[in-house]
Structure formats: structure tokens, C-alpha cells
Amino acid sequence: MFADYSWGELGSIFAMQGFAGLILFSVFVLMALGLAIIFGQMGVINMAHGEFMILGAYVTYLMSGLFQTWLPGLFGIYFFVAMALAFVVAGALGMVVEWALIRRLYHRPLDTLLATWGLSLILQQTYRSVFGAREVGVTVPSWMMGSLPLTNMIEVPISGLFVMVLTIVIAAGVYLLLYRSQWGLQVRAVMANRTMAEATGINTGRTDRLTFGIGCGVAGVAGSAFTMIGSTGPTSGQLYIVDTFLVVVFGGSASLLGTIASAFTISQTQSFLEFFLSGSMAKVLTLLAVVGVLMLRPQGLFTLKLRK
Amino acid sequence: MRDTTLAASPTRGFLTRTELAGAAILAILIFLVLPAILDPFRLNLYGKYLTYAFVAVGLVLCWGAGGILSLGQGVFFGLGGYCMAMFLKLEASTPEATAIQSTPGIPDFMDWNQVTALPWWWEPFHSLTFTLVAVVAVPVAFAFVIGMAMFRRRVGGVYFSIITQAIAAILTILIIGQQGYTGGVNGITDLRTLKGWDIRTDDAKEVLYLVNGVLLFACLGIAQFIRRSKAGRLLIAMRDREDRVRFSGYDVAAFKIFVFCVGAAFAAIGGAMFTLQVGFMSPSFVGIVPSIEMVIFCAVGGRHSILGAVWGALLVNLAKTGFSESFPELWQFGLGGLFIAVVLFFPEGLAGLWNRHVAPLPARLRRRPVPPQVPSPAAAPKKPMPPASPAGTSPAAAPAE
Amino acid sequence: MSIENPRLILSVEDLTVSFDGFKAVDGLNLYIAPNECRVIIGPNGAGKTTVLDLICGRTRATSGSVEFKGMELLKMREDQIVHAGVGRKFQTPSVYEDLTVFENLEISYPRGYSVFGALAFRRTAEVRERIEEVAEVIFLSDHLDQKSAHLSHGQKQWLEIGMLLIQDPQLLMLDEPVAGMSVAERVKTAELLNRIIADRSVIVVEHDMKFVEEIATRVTVLHRGKLLAEGSMAHVQADPDVIEVYLGH
């Protein structure tokens, strides 16, 4: 199958495919970051994670319309405002959900899974009732359109680059939050030993709520970033949930670096396979490989061996 | 509380009196009442609901007893259904019936997708005997492979759930992607006869409904047998103290694989009966969404109750049909709410409500001179109940090490 | 120090396990004779429970060997180790709370281990007799039909010992059998243990020194995963290293 291409062409194809893989990688990382906090740190399965992302996307969509109508002069920067708002809205909803639902189910992980699935159905229908069943897209500011020619055969879209930069910034932010902030210390203390953390004066209930909220807020930001490269529908979130969970579990659920490495592995595998096979077969083989590896190494790729 | 009475007399027979009464009520409803009062169309619809009951009963064993929550039961339901559909499709695709195709004698969707010969793995489905074996054997073999890989590696709890869900997603993508061999997103449709017997007539539908009922009761019997055996008690023991069971000398994985395979077999039989009664099979019964809905049938009925699972499948589907005909939006909210409510407020499902409120009623009425009221089983779900203590009821699901 | 020594039922040699570089058990040698009651003591984190975990297969060793009646346990699965004749009691009482005392003992009855064996298992008179016999030994005859969730802490500990007893293991490993017991229960437990250790080997991990004195044939002191001292109770108590570890810091 390579015979028809020259070496130069092949190189370009791989580069382009690699770039497509990098965008997919950014998408996976963005999706997985919030989940890495909620599932990785708290051990809570939130099946409505995709819906929190979509919430961020809808917030961005609303802001795009709002700026176009009322503040066309500032349209170039609406996206940053939208992202901040997406974080706040999704985070606030997350805290409400934690208070009303999640905290009652901390010792019943399988039940949490079912309850949050119910939540996801309710959110989907809410989106459908409010925004309609059709997919909506945002207007991308002009500076983000077009592409950057790297060589005469390789071009990269600016919006894709922007999403990548955003991914790096958000990932760094989450890292700092988890490992360098007072809050992160408290979260890790609570997860390591709840009783002890309580005894040292940490309000574990509040920490849980905040953690869940921040995880959902990060999901909202991810959804916001998605609008730059795709459109949003009420059930878009559900499409991602399996991939997202696999990324987090594959990476070893408690490790942020593992999550990023696993997102990289999975996205690159998938996008290279897509070049040789149909999209659906590439997806099937990638997921099968991930499931296969998980069966060999259930604890994920990057976990510490701990004494029970 | 039922468990205590069971255990108090170790020699008690196969069914307690309550269980026997429950089974009798269900049998009367399925074999006498429903066929008598429903027109063939509605009866067929109930038959379809009851095919989901097979899955729900399997989930009572896996999830309720064993603490293994599979979010991929649609895979087995679908595989069973597809095996049946392949046979029926081949029978419907005689060279005469498909003479207008560019390759006559193969299923129409293959012809549309430029497939010119029947794939080798379709060939054996010309035989009904092979098909009937495959309906159960293929899903069970698949479940066995998954079970071996996961339970031997001690994958459990939510990890198992997520991976089974991923498998459901993978199979759906595969079926839709390979439409030349599977019928794609439309599935395998336009099924007509079984060995020359037209399954689309009203008479045939009634017969299939009854066959479905008999098979369901056979599965209920098997499920009850497993639960009443030492294997059933071991499953409960494993759910609560897996390590203790292991260090009492049992190969925990073998028991989990077994019960997972039994659940798969039940689901597969349900799937095959679905194909026969509804006349088609498609990926929309395989994926993530249908698979998790099957869990809610079981949860609503009561995850520890075999009979409850049947009621759950019937009632949730009735509600679904009722709502989605008149208020489709409301149904989504209702289903979402149901997931949350069943987990938060009545984790024991209808069976729990029944045991708590309806079953003690006759005794209470006898004490007070109130006009007696015969409680109907369907009336049970109306009453909300304070959350039961989660301590003994929730399946312990420690994540894999 | 030969492995083939017929007078030993268990030979643990050079046993090591490391968790990410931390050696919880480090080059341990341990030899148990038939009918011996060995007590393992040591400060918190000395690796006592880990040693039991390694012997019964709950934790996989990094290196070394554990030989039981000529069988290498490190290569066997947990249930196979149990079938070979090793029983293990956990630190916190580990019984099936949803089942009755009778059913708890029945599950532990050494028959019907395979799936189909368990499906075909019947409660014969022989099974019932044996269960009643064990219930008598563990002071629970009157509680057979009670759900084990309703037992007291001490009764749960006895029930778990009974669940092991019904399998008649040749090597019994008990992890802190009297922890959290009242004085009366402790005395009864000592009596129970003294009765059941008569014709088998026992390894006990225990903190309660008075209790240790009552039951131990020999005592092994662990410290940071290594063997610190071994011998009779009096010998060990006089060992300057042991005194240093227990009172030093």
C-alpha cells in the first residue's frame, strides 16, 4: 500500500496523521483531566461527565451569540470569557450534584454509576428541551481561522494549535492545583486517610464537594475548548464517556502523568490506524487493544504497587 | 428478612410459600390473563418486554447475588438475537426470493454493499440445529473469554463495569462498521419464516409468546436452583468477603465466570426470542444505552429478587411505551429520575417495597377490623419508602487491586 | 537447616517482598515443626501480617521459597494452598454477615469446592453433624440459626476460627485472634486455642504478651521485615536487641 507514495509524501502523510493524532490527544487529555480528579482522586464514577463537558460547550455557544449581538468589538476575546464562565457554571452544577446525590453514595460505587447515568439522561433531555436536538456550532473568531503552512505539503489548522496550547495550559493548571496548592494537599490527604484528615481539622465534606466541583469545572472548560473543533449536540457527551474512562483507567487512575501518557498512546494508535483502516475498524482495534492491556495489567500502566 | 426465615430451617424446600405464591401469580398473569385480555399486537408487545426479563433475571444472579455489575448485557442479548436473525435471514434469502439482486441467494444488505458471496461464518446458519446451539453457545463462549480474562486477573467492581461497557461500545461500532456482513445500523430485518412457518402471523406470534413464557419460567427455575444451592450462598459470601471465600479454598474466579456465563446465556435466549417475536435485530439493542437500561429493569424489580426482575422489565417497559407515545420528553426525565430514585430511595426495588409494605399487610389487617383489601402486585411501586440502610444491602465492590 | 528436614512442616527460606523498593519482609527464614505453636511478635510495621499474607498466597513474594510438606506454596493459587492444608484467619473478623452461623460453617465445609460440586452439594446428616460438632467447640451451638452480623465481636472471631477448624488444616495461621476482646472472651479464646492446637501447627501474630505467654511454644520477633530474635518467651524477653526495639525509641 506504500508503493504509490514517494518518501516525501509518506513523510508528510505521517506528519499530518500525527498532527491529527495530536488534536485527538488534546481532546482526550481535556476530557480525562476532570475525570482524573473525580475518579482518580475521589474514586467516584461520574457517568454524567460528558454532560458536564457539553454544558461548557453550550455556555460557549451562548457567549458566542451574545458577543456577536451585543459586543461585536470584543468578539475576538469572547472565547476566554466563555471558558471562565464554563468553568464556573459546570463547577457550580457539580457542587450541587455532589451535595444532592454523590455524597449519599460514597460507599456504593456501582450505585453511584447508575445514579449518575440517570443524571446524564436528565441533563441530555434538558439540553434537548432548551437548545433543540440539532447540533449547534459557535462562530470562531477570525484570528483562529485558517491554517499555518509548515512545509509546502504540511499545513496545520490554527484552531487545532490553539486547542493544543489550551490543553497544555489546563493540564499545567490542574497539576499545580493538585500537587502545589493547599487544596490539592487537602484532597490528597482526605483520599489517603479520611479519618486522619478529619482529625487534623480538614472539613472532608467540603473538600469532597470542592473536588467534585473542580473536576466538573475542568470538564466544562474542556467542553468549551471542543467548540473550536466541532459542533455540540445534546448527546455529544455520551459519545466520549467510554473513551474517557478507558483513558483514565489505562493510565492508572491515580496518576495525572499516567492519564496524559495514556491519552497520548491511545490517540496516536487510533489516528495511525485510521490511515490504514476505516475509521470504525481503527476505533475497534484501538479499544480492543486498550481492553486487552487492561486485562493483562488491571491496575493501569502507571501505578505504584502498594501494600494492602 | 426473608433470608433469615430461609436459613432458620436449612431443610426448607426449593421455594418458600411466598416465593411459590409469587411464581403462581406471575404464571397466571403470563399464561392466562395476558393472552385472554390482550389483542395479538399488544400481546406481542408484552412478549417483547418479557424478553428483557431474561436479561434482568441474569443480572439478579450476577449483580444482586454476585456483586458483578455488567454494563454489557446487551452484547449477549444481541449475539443471541443476531444468531437467530442470521438463520431467519438466510431462510428469507432464497435465490427465488432474491432473484432481482445482482447476486441472488445472499441476504439483501450484502448485495447492497457489493458483497458477492456469503461469508464463511454465515454458512453454518443454514442449519436450525446449529443456530439453536449457537444462540446460547456463542454468547456463553464470549462471556467465558471475558470472564476468564477479567476475573482471573481479579478485575472487579467498577472496573469490570467500565470494561464491559467498553465491550458493548466496541461491538456496536463493529456491527455498524461492517454493514456488508451484519446489516449495519439497520440490523438484520425483513425476517419471515422459521422452517416454512410464517412468524409474522397473529397465530405464530401467540405461539411464540407462549414459548417465550415457558423459556422464561425455565430460566427462573434455573436461577432459583443456583441461588438455593451452595453456589448461590457462595456468591453472596463472595460479594461481601471475597478474600474469606478464597481462603476457604474456593476458586473465586471460577464461580464468577460461571455466573457471568449463566447471565449471558439467559440474555442470549431473551435476544433470540426477541428476534423471533419482533422480526428483526439491530445494533440498537447491543450498545451502551440499551445495556444500562437492562440494569435498571433489574434494579427497579429488586436486584435480589428473581421474580422482581420480571416485574421490573414489564413495568419499566410499559411505562416507557406509555410515556414515549404521548410525552417523549417526559420519558427521558422519568427514566433518569428512576435511575436516581431506585438507587437513593429504594435500592431493594419493587421486591423490597413489596416485602416491607404489602407482604405484612394481611397480618396487620387481621389485627385491625378494617375492610380487607387485596393488594395487587402492580400497586406496590406507588409508595415511596425511606432509604433502606445501605450497610447490608449494597453490593460491596472493592476496586481491583 | 535443610529444606528436606522431615521434622519440619513449613520451611520459609530467604523470603523477601518489596513494594516499590520498600522491603516489607527481607530475607526471612522461618521453620515450623509439626504441632508447634509459634507466635510472631514485633512492633507495628515489622511485617508480621505480611509474612502470613506471603505464606497463604495473598501477597506475591519477590523472592525466596515457602515449602509446606514438600510443596512450594509460592507457585500455588490461594485456593490450592488451602487445599494443601493451610488455613488463615484475618485480623479483623471476616465472616459472611448476610449468612447464618450454620451457613458460614457450611460454606467452609471441605467439600464441593468446584462450581458444579457446589451446585450439587447437599446438606447431609454427616455435614450437619460436623457443623454442630465445630459449633460446640467454638461456643456457638445456640447461635447456629442467627445471622452472623448479629454476633458480638468475640463471637465473630470464634466463628472465623471455627470456619478454619472445620477444614482441619495442618497449619493454622491466626492474625491477632484476641484483639478487641473482653477479658472473659480472651480467657475463653486461649482455652479454645489450646484445645485446637493439639494436633496441628499454628502460627499466631499477636500483641497481647500475656496471651502469647499462655500459648506459645516458641516466639519469633520481627523488626523491619527481618528476624530479630527467636526462641522461648523467656529467652526472647531477655534479648537486648528485643528490649532495644520495644523500649528504645
Image (tube, coloured by chain):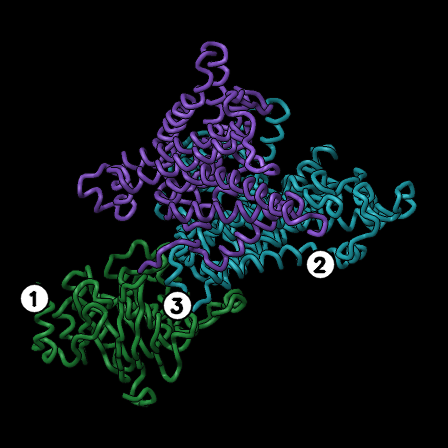
Chain colours: A purple, B cyan, C green
Disc 3 packing (10 Å; few <14; some 14–19; many ≥20): many
Residue that numbered label 3 is attached to: B248
In the figure, B152 relative to A235: above or below?
below
Taking the image as shown, residue B112 lies to the left or right of residue A65, namely right
Taking the image as shown, residue C112 lies to the left or right of residue A213, namely right
Q: Amino acid at mark 1?
A: Leu
Identify the subunit bearing mark 1: C
Q: Position of residue B17 (x, y in %)?
A: 51, 50
Q: Nearer the viewer, residue C202 or A145?
A: A145
User: Which residue is rendered at x = 43% and y = 20% of the image?
Assistant: A77
Mark 1 or 2, which is nearer the eye?
1
| Residues behind callouts 3 and 2 on a single chain | yes
Disc 1 packing (10 Å; few <14; some 14–19; many ≥20): few
Q: Tag 2's secondary structure? A: helix
Mark 1 vs 2: CB contact within 8 A: no
| Residues behind callouts 1 and 3 on a single chain | no
Mark 1 vs 3: CB contact within 8 A: no
Whole-Å distance between the Cαs marked 3 and 2?
A: 36 Å
Residue that numbered label 1 is attached to: C247
Q: Position of residue A203 (x, y in %)?
A: 23, 36
User: Which residue is rendered at x = 75% and y = 59% of the image?
Assistant: B130
Residue that numbered label 2 is attached to: B133
Determine which of the numbered discs, if any, sits on residue B212 in the image. Answer: none
Q: Is residue B213 visible?
A: no
Q: Earlier in the sequence, mark 3 or mark 2?
A: 2
Q: Tag 3's secondary structure? A: loop
Q: Is residue A297 visible?
A: yes
